[in-house]
């Protein structure tokens, strides 16, 4: 058994900033971060556009950012949360800068502020088109200089430890659930470690891998949502899966799909059909800069009508020198595929990008399970409502990691280690010889979700998806009970759970809002 004051699951922006805050507050506490791949691998690392904050009060205001967020969320945001996040944003951003993150500046030394869909002002701070890479770089340098943080790479959190794992627990009478840490699979040694903590923070990111075409890397398998659901935490709003309008179309499609940042449209790029028609004016007066749900649905409609596989993003009219300065990574990728953006349009498709809901947390990041906090993309804070405003995710993680920190500082004073926690039980398990069930299971889930639970849903498709998912669920649970644990099997379980929840929550939603569209209600 390993004991730590704070156990942090995940090394994206949410997990790293929370760990830094608690570790810097007192040298006497110890913090363990477990992360399932290399320490920088995360959705954060691939963030392109940047972080939305109100920077210059002469041209922008908190009220405008608040209204833009509320409009994008289509009436389902929690306004108190929106106000809090927007207003606390600048202070949190300054801390990120103090930790060494560099943002681009213009010729006169002010921040170079980008624009994205749904924003009424230029307010996106960015580091070229690799903002997330820069954030991970700087935060990991800070972590390496903080001796009371231990970072365990290739360590996969399997489940939270709660009363359900204790021998004497009577499940029927259990009203309050407490988290005592987590079981973690060390991929280096294949042993399951029992990590007992006073405070557990889950910052495990997204679940884009539930779909075939996604901008999310392979690690985004909805683990936090799966673990929380099994531990009986409250989950909400997971039907609001956000599809990004412009992932690069390639044959075969790469996984993850390479993103062409929305900031490119903010810079003036236009969408065209294969015949060259500018189509966005048919859908919204903001055209290319309408919010993401609207642009993604417009592309989906155009593709279904034409039978084409992709539409185009036209950058040929843009100032090439400035484009190159702001988007060197995108330019490089296009070049590598023989696309000279000065002459050729970029083929793009929609791709699963972000989950707006997740583990329900209050304004201090507390889940419905005692001593378990959650932060970042795996949560549902109420900020995004039915559709997240572009570049509000990194902001949300920053603001909430501070709020979780402040609250957990008080909580930890009254928590002691639970010494009764049992070690991981491996009785009656053997090496799985049916790997095909896992690999095939994963691709089947992705196909079901893409075909039936995508941008446009219907009652019939949802019912069909639920039925198919339940077959894979039964098969996988059987395999899980009899197999020696593996990351692939655990990820599949979490993907199935997340997919099932997206499906179920979609069935329960009876009106179209933001990113949720059921054609039976239109
Ligand atoms: P992540 O950054 O995904 O980190 C999760 C961490 O948890 C990872 O280290 C992962 O390995 C680890 N983990 C997961 N499960 C386990 C487990 N079982 N055990 C151990 N470790 C685990 N948002 C913006 O605001 N602006 C942008 O410009 C922007 N661009 C984006 C571009 C792309 C291509 C993508 C994919 C997303 C983008 N987003 C953007 C969204 C944003 O990047 C993410 O929502 C945000 O970074 C999530 O941060 P996080 O810390 O919650 O999760
Ligand atoms: C992008 O750069 O288009 C992604 C921004 C985001 O997801 O907020």
Image (cartoon, grey):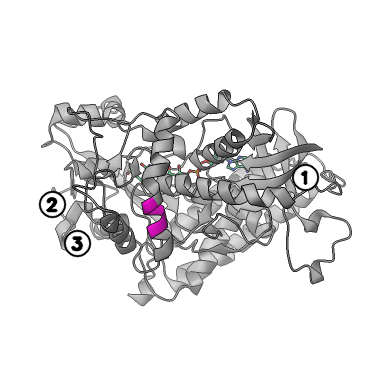
Secondary structure beneath label 2:
loop
Residue sitting at x 29%, y 42%: 124
Please state the horizontal and vertical placement of residue 3, each as a whole percent of the image: 77, 38
Q: Which mark is residue 483?
A: 1
Residue 169 horizontal side relative to residue 183, left or right: right
Residue sitting at x 13%, y 52%: 277
Of the two numbered discs 1 and 2 on the same chain, state the one appearing first in sequence.
2
| Vertical relation: 79 (above or below) 23 | below
Location of mark 2 (residue): 277
Q: Which mark is residue 284?
A: 3
Q: How many marks?
A: 3
The residues colored magenta run 83-87
Q: Is residue 86 magenta?
A: yes
Front position in the image: 440 or 39: 39
Front position in the image: 339 or 47: 47
| Vertical relation: 133 (above or below) 289 | above
User: Which quarter of the rendering shows the C terminus?
Assistant: bottom left
Q: Is residue 301 magenta?
A: no
Q: Is residue 77 visible?
A: no
Secondary structure beneath label 3:
loop
Disc 1 from disc 3: Cα separation:
52 Å
């Amino acid at each position: 058994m390993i004991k730590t004051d704070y156990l942090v699951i995940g090394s994206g922006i949410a997990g790293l900033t929370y760990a830094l805050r608690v570790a810097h507050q007192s040298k006497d506490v110890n913090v363990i971060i477990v992360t399932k791949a290399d320490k920088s691998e995360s959705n954060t690392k691939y963030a392109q556009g940047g972080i939305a904050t109100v920077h210059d009060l002469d041209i922008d205001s908190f009220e405008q950012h608040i209204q833009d967020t509320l409009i994008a969320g289509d009436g389902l945001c929690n306004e108190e949360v929106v106000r809090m996040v927007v207003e606390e944003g600048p202070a949190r951003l300054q801390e990120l800068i103090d930790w060494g993150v560099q943002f681009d500046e213009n010729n006169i030394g002010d921040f170079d502020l980008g624009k994205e869909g749904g924003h009424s002002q230029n307010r996106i701070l960015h580091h070229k088109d690799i903002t997330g890479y820069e954030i991970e770089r700087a935060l990991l340098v800070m972590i390496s200089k903080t001796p009371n943080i231990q970072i365990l790479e290739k360590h996969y959190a399997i489940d939270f430890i709660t009363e359900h794992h204790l021998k004497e627990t009577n499940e029927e009478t259990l009203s309050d659930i407490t988290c005592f840490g987590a079981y973690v699979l060390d991929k280096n040694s294949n042993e399951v470690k029992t990590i007992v903590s006073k405070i557990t923070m889950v910052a495990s990111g997204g679940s884009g891998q539930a779909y075939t075409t996604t901008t999310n890397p392979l690690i985004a398998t909805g683990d936090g949502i799966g673990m929380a659901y099994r531990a009986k935490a409250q989950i909400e709003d997971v039907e609001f899966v956000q599809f990004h309008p412009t992932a690069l179309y390639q044959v075969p499609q790469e996984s993850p799909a390479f993103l062409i940042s929305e900031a490119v449209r903010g810079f003036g790029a236009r969408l065209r059909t294969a015949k060259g028609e500018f189509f966005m004016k048919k859908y919204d007066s903001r055209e290319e800069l309408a919010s993401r749900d609207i642009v993604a649905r417009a592309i989906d409609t155009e593709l279904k009508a034409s039978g084409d596989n992709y539409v185009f993003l036209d950058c040929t009219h843009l100032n090439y020198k400035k484009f190159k300065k702001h988007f060197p990574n995108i330019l490089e990728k296009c070049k590598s595929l023989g696309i000279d953006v000065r002459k050729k349009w970029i083929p793009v498709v929609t791709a699963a990008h972000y989950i707006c809901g997740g583990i329900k947390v209050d304004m201090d990041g507390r889940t419905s399970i005692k001593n378990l906090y959650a932060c970042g993309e795996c949560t549902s804070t109420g900020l995004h409502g039915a559709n997240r405003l572009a570049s509000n995710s990194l902001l949300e993680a920053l603001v909430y990691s501070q709020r979780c920190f402040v609250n957990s500082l008080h909580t930890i004073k009254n928590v002691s280690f639970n010494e009764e926690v049992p070690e991981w039980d491996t009785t009656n398990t053997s090496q799985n010889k049916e790997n095909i069930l896992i690999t095939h299971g994963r691709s089947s889930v992705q196909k079901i979700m893409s075909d039936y639970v995508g941008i446009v849903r219907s009652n019939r498709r949802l019912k069909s998806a639920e039925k198919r998912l339940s077959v894979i669920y039964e098969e996988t649970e059987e395999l899980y009970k009899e197999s020696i644990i593996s990351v692939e099997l655990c990820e599949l379980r979490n993907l199935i759970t997340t997919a099932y929840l997206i499906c179920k929550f979609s069935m329960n939603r009876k009106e179209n809002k933001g990113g949720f569209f059921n054609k039976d209600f239109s």
